[in-house]
Image: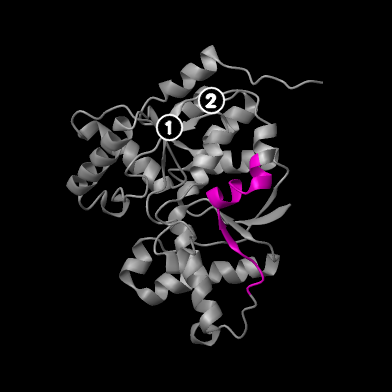
Amino acid sequence: MKLSYYPGCSLEGTALDYDRSVRDVCRALDIDLLEIPDWNCCGASSAHMTDHEIGMRLPIRNLLLAAEIGCDILVPCAACYQRLKAADKALRTDPGFWDVARFSGDFQIVHISSFLARPEILAAIEARVIRNLADLPIACYYGCLSLRNPRITDAPRWEMPTTLESIVAAIGARPVAWSHRTECCSGSLTMARPDIAEKLVGDIVRAAKRAGATAMVTDCPMCQANVESRQPAVEGVGDMPVFFVTELIEAAMSGTYPSKQQRAHLVPPGVLTGIFSASTMKKEGPA
């Protein structure tokens, strides 16, 4: 299988480890990622909050580059996914308005979790698990950008998503039922209004703990960075690690959780390192 790949700016900066895990997981699943050549920033969130035209023309250029490859586009970042989807809809509605003579759009824009939760991909992941996650109670956190507004994202279950739950269950974790999985973490305000970010992050982490979770998992680089980095400032919260979904898949399929990846976290990932030190090997079936 071949897919175009749009990493976006975060995955070449603060979420470099996310990019690496996406590539490693896809390689292990025999998925060939074709990075869009000369891709540019999608404009989230600075451009589209400042100038609508700039906020559209940036992702439009990426789509025109991707069209030359002709494969579906895999997008790990929730904000990038939303901007590319918005541009795609604009081009399909009126390409001439954006100075595009013709836009065939013979491809789909696919968010990472929707792709990994496909039945055939889940089966391939499960078959490759070397070391399962030992019933780790985990809160699946979607945030808001990969799901809302559904008129842009086309998310079928934008209030009650299940993709992350399906993925972590396939690698042996136990997704908990909780109240805040689609609540905003205020990532876009984390620098301008840290007081708001701390309040929302505190609410999210407390809700996850009330549900019995000892960790969170997400597919959004902004959410991961914001929820981990804001915890130390929130009284009585403190120690809830937030993993990328591909990070957990890679650990389960490789049977290891390297110290280099552990150091990428701002909150110590002890709940996962404990599993891999004590470890539960996946039982092999009959020969």
Q: Residue at x 65, y 77 (%)?
A: 104
Residue that label 2 marks: 133
Q: Quadrant of residue 228?
A: top left
Q: Residues under labels 1 and 2: Cα distance?
A: 10 Å
Nearer-the-camera pick, 88 or 100: 88
Amino acid identity at mark 2: Leu
Magenta stretch holds residue 121: yes
Name the disc covering residue 47, or none.
Answer: none
* Circle 2 SS class: loop
- Judge from the rendering whether residue 279 lies leftward or rightward of residue 147; answer left or right: right
Quadrant in which the C terminus appears: top right
**Residue 47: x percent and y percent?**
37, 66
Name the disc covering residue 138, or none.
Answer: 1
Q: In this picture, which residue range is highlighted in magenta?
A: 105-122
Nearer-the-camera pick, 60 or 91: 91
- Judge from the rendering whether residue 188 lies leftward or rightward of residue 134; answer left or right: left
Amino acid identity at mark 1: Ile
Which is nearer the N-term, disc 1 or disc 2? 2
Q: Residue at x 60, y 72 (%)?
A: 64
Does the CB distance between marks 1 and 2 fall below 8 Å?
yes
Q: Is residue 53 above or below residue 131?
A: below
**Residue 221: x percent and y percent?**
43, 46
Q: Residue at x 39, y 64 (%)?
A: 149
Q: Can residue 36 be spotted in the picture?
A: no
